[in-house]
Image (tube, rainbow, N blue to C red):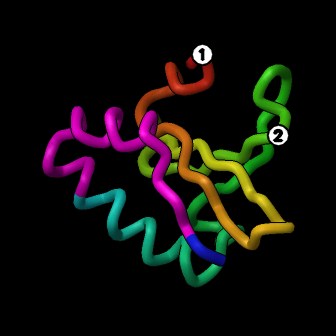
Amino acid sequence: MKIVHTTHFRRAFKKLTERQKSIFFQKLKLFQEDIFSPELKTHKLRGPFRHFFAFSLTSSERVVFQIDKEQKMIFLYDIGSHKVYKA
């Protein structure tokens, strides 16, 4: 599947520290191999985000994404602490 970074994601990514960006790229490589790898702790969200999933970068940082099976694309929507669930 093709991975697309939304404008919202790109803005949030720019605010990350170099350490956080490094962790993201490590996890992204794993994500590209297996979206549901146990190491990522990928999970479906609930409530107003019920059409989204998230995977863990660290114990407090997440990447929120959406899967479009028809277009065979994954949209990375947001990155950051649990505040991303309140976007």
Residue 34 at x, y percent in the picture: 64, 78
Residue 86: mark:
1
Q: Amino acid at mark 2?
A: His
Image-quadrant location for residue 36: bottom right
Residue 54, given in percent of the width and then of the height, sits at: 64, 46
Q: What residue is shown with label 2?
A: 51
Q: Residues within 10 Å of mark 1 (few under 14, many from 20)?
A: few
What range is drawn magenta here? 3-21
Q: Is residue 14 left or right of residue 24?
A: left
Q: Name the residue: 59% across, 74% down.
A: 2
Residue 18 included in the magenta stretch of the image: yes
Q: Position of residue 29 (x, y in %)?
A: 43, 76
Relative vertical location of residue 11 with respect to residue 2 in this rendering, above or below: above
Q: Residue furthest left?
A: 18
Q: Amino acid at mark 1?
A: Lys
Q: N-terminal of the two: label 2 or label 1?
A: 2
List x then y, in percent, for residue 11: 32, 34
Residue located at (35% from left, 58% from top): 24
Against 19, residue 86 (above or below) is above
Which residue appears at 35% of the width and 34% of the height?
12
Secondary structure of the residue carrying tag 2 is loop
